[in-house]
Amino acid sequence: MTRTKVSTTMTSTKKALMTLSLAALAALPMLPTQVTAADPPPVAYPEGYRNWTHVKSMVIQPGHALFDAFGGIHHLYANKKALAGYRAGKFADGAVIVFDLLDAKSADNTVQEGARKVVGVMVKDARRYAATGGWGFEGFKGDSKTERAVGNNAAAACYQCHTAKKDADFVFSAWRP
């Protein structure tokens, strides 16, 4: 092939590719798009939760099935909407429950609070957290207000167990008048 024929063939090929590219771009709006659910918004650290209503305390000791993950002293707190939910048996959007887990230390024939292990948070928002029963879940490690233990793993890390309490709006704890 001569140089002129090669150049003409390449120019024709470039024009054909350009035409195909433009046709493909023009057809994009007609193609079905895959809709994927965005990750739910992160749950915020519950500032001032220790001033909320204290719902209950509990100690999980060695021998309990959840000791490895949740052994220690638990204090549960509820904001005003969560407190109303405990009383009614159904939680409204905006309800926040905090699970404050501390090491349990034995000293002088007493059980005392040790270091904080995690601040667990449940936030009710039926629209934002529809995939997890209307609840957003998070755990903040130790005394950190930013280091997250759950993140985008709420379905497996929290909700999977909470489904056992579906009839109680996915909440394990109960109000004791």
Image (cartoon, rainbow, N blue to C red):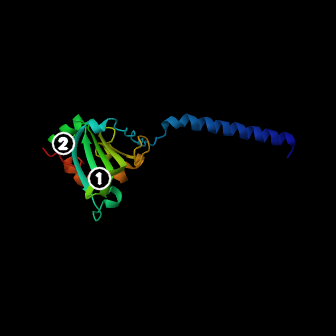
Pinpoint residue 27: horizontal percent, then vertical percent: 54, 36
Is residue 4 shown left or right of residue 112? right
Residue under label 1, please give it.
Answer: 112
The three-letter code of the residue at mark 2 reads: Tyr
User: In this rendering, does residue 19 appear at all?
Assistant: yes
Rate crowding at label 1 as few (under 14), some (14 to 19) or many (20 or more) other CA atoms within 10 Å: some
Q: Earlier in the sequence, mark 2 or mark 1?
A: 2
Pinpoint residue 38: horizontal percent, then vertical percent: 42, 41
Residue under label 2, please give it.
Answer: 86
Q: Based on the displayed image, in which of its 4 quarters is residue 161 positioned? A: bottom left
- Evaluate if marks 2 and 1 touch, with contact meaning CB atoms under 8 Å apart: no
The three-letter code of the residue at mark 1 reads: Gln
- Local secondary structure at mark 1: strand
Q: Quadrant of the C terminus?
A: top left
Q: Is residue 43 above or below residue 111?
A: above
Viewer-side residue, 98 vs 150: 98
* Nearer the camera: disc 2 or disc 1: 1
Taking the spot 20% from the left edge, 39% from the top edge, the residue there is 83
